[in-house]
Structures are given as C-alpha cells and as structure tokens.
Image: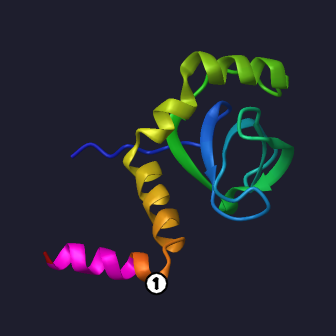
C-alpha cells in the first residue's frame, strides 16, 4: 500500500480550518518556522498573513510559485492551474457544501427530506 504524504511546502494549497478566514483556500507562500507559515489567497480574498499550521489542512494541489512570491504571481498561477474549479470537483469540497446546505435547512425542509428518504 502506497501512503501519500502531503508535505508543507511553498506553493501547497491549503484549506483554512478555523480562524477569521475559515472555509477558504490559500497558498503557502513561505515557511516561517516549524509551526507557522505565510499564506495568501488571491482568488479567495485571504490577505497575506502568518498562520499556525494547526489552522490549516493541506490539499493535494501544489502551485509552482517562488518563495515569498508577489500576489500577482500567485494569482496568475492559481488561475493557470484552475485551482478553484479543481477544488469544487473534489469530494472534500462537496462534503463541505452539503454540510453548509443542511445547516441552512428550515424545519419544513428537514421534514420534506425525512419523507423523501422514507419513500
């Protein structure tokens, strides 16, 4: 069995699990130390800032960006690799969307869903 390990590296696309930008995608632009990284999400409105690695979940996507690359370069690579579209097609993103959709259901919507499952 081959084990795939996602490494913390410059250009790795990550999902922000908690904090101000929870639920958004970002790119690791620089590694500060073993606990913190510099991130930026040019297409998801995440400003450049340092974040603890515990707040990030690494995805399978990697961009070829230079260390501490400017926002313009990161945005260009993001759009070239079509990361937003690739992310929306993953099972992970679909589960998150379903969770958000279920959280917004009204009482009547939950009742209709229950009856649809029974049928």
Residue drawn at x 40%, y 42% is 90
- The image shows residue 12 at horizontal and vertical percentages of 61, 36
Locate the C terminus by quadrant.
Answer: bottom left
Tell me the residue that label 1 is attached to: 107
Taking 54 as reference, is 52 left or right?
right
Please, what is the dominant secondary structure of the magenta stretch?
helix
Q: Which residues are magenta?
A: 110-118
Taking 78 as reference, is 3 left or right?
left
Taking 2 as reference, is 33 left or right?
right
- The image shows residue 26 at horizontal and vertical percentages of 69, 41
Closest to the observer, 102 or 108 = 108
- The image shows residue 41 at horizontal and vertical percentages of 74, 38
Can residue 66 be seen in the rendering of this structure?
no
**Helix, strand or loop under label 1:** helix
Q: Answer above or below: position of 63 versus 27.
A: above
Q: Residue furthest left?
A: 119
- The image shows residue 39 at horizontal and vertical percentages of 77, 42
- Decide whether residue 51 is among the magenta residues: no
The quadrant where residue 9 appears? top right
Closest to the observer, 81 or 45 = 45
Can residue 4 be seen in the rendering of this structure?
yes
- Decide whether residue 116 is among the magenta residues: yes
Residue drawn at x 32%, y 46% is 3
The quadrant where residue 17 appears? bottom right
């Amino acid at each position: 069995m081959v084990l795939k390990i996602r490494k913390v590296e410059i250009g790795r696309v990550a999902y922000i699990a908690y904090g101000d930008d929870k639920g958004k995608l970002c790119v690791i632009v620089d590694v500060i130390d073993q606990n913190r990284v510099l991130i930026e999400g040019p297409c998801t409105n995440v400003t450049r800032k340092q974040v603890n690695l515990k707040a990030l979940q690494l995805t399978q996507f990697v961009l070829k960006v230079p260390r501490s690359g400017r926002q313009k370069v990161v945005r260009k690579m993001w759009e070239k690799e079509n990361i937003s579209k690739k992310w929306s097609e993953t099972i992970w993103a679909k589960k998150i969307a379903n969770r958000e959709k279920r959280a917004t259901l009204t009482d009547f919507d939950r009742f209709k869903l229950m009856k649809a499952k029974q049928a």
